[in-house]
């Protein structure tokens, strides 16, 4: 029945600052309607997973965590460093891939993943 995610939507306290940050940090082309269409590429996966309220994988006060796939985590780290976005969690390598975390202007942790 489900074909995929139709979108991710959330409220923000400072729309312009958040749009600018996501545009610069993650190179997401935010359009004048305050969003963008991300077209999946071959090999891209979308994970849908639940966590218990007390799981500490990401902060318990954060209800949802975004995870974006990137092509090259090391190049992504260089880009983030160049524009002054610090890592909230240094690179972690596991059997699932390579991961880093960054924090958006409103304090939400965002996970970046190289498969």
Image (cartoon, rainbow, N blue to C red):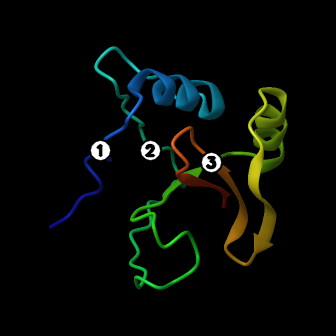
Nearest the eye: 61 or 89: 61
Distance in Å between CA atoms under marks 3 and 1: 18 Å
**Along the viewing direction, whichever of 112 and 56 lies nearer the viewer:** 56
Query: Outermost residue toward the left?
Result: 1
Residue that sits furthest to the top in the current view: 32
Return the residue at label 3.
103
Q: Is residue 44 left or right of residue 39?
A: right
Q: Please give the name of the residue rendered at 69% of the width and 45% of the height, measured from the top-left corner.
A: 71
Q: Secondary structure at mark 2?
A: loop
- Disc nearer the start of the sequence (2/1): 1
Disc ID at residue 40: 2
Query: From what the image shows, is residue 35 above or below residue 63?
Result: above
Tags 2 and 3 in contact by the CB under 8 Å rule? no
Q: Residues within 10 Å of mark 1 (few under 14, many from 20)?
A: few
Provide residue 21's location: percent of width, then percent of height.
Answer: 57, 29
Badge 1 element: loop
Q: From what the image shows, is residue 39 above or below residue 113?
A: above
The percent coordinates of residue 60 (x first, y second) are 48, 73
Which image quarter holds the C terminus?
Answer: bottom right
* Residue drawn at 41 percent across, 85 percent down: 52
Residue shown at 38% from the left, 28% from the top: 36
How dense is the environment of label 3, judged by Cα within 10 Å: few (below 14), some, or many (20 and up)? some
Q: Nearer the viewer, residue 83 or 75?
A: 83
Query: Which residue corresponds to mark 1?
Result: 9
Which of the two residues, 111 or 106, is positioned nearer the viewer here?
A: 106
Nearer the observer, disc 3 or disc 1? 3
Q: Quadrant of residue 78?
A: top right
What is the x, y in percent for residue 35? 35, 28
Q: Nearer the viewer, mark 2 or mark 1?
A: 1
**First along the sequence among labels 2 and 3:** 2
């Amino acid at each position: 029945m489900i074909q995929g995610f139709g979108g991710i939507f959330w409220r923000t306290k400072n729309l312009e600052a958040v749009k600018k940050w996501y545009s610069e940090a993650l190179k997401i082309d935010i359009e004048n309607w305050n969003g963008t269409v991300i077209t999946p590429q071959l090999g891209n996966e979308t994970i849908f997973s639940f966590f218990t309220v007390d799981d500490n994988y990401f902060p318990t006060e954060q209800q949802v965590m975004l995870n974006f796939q990137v092509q090259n985590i090391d190049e992504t780290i260089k880009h983030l460093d160049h524009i002054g976005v610090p890592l909230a969690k240094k690179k972690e390598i596991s059997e699932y891939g390579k991961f880093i975390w960054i924090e958006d202007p409103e304090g939400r942790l965002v996970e970046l993943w190289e498969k």
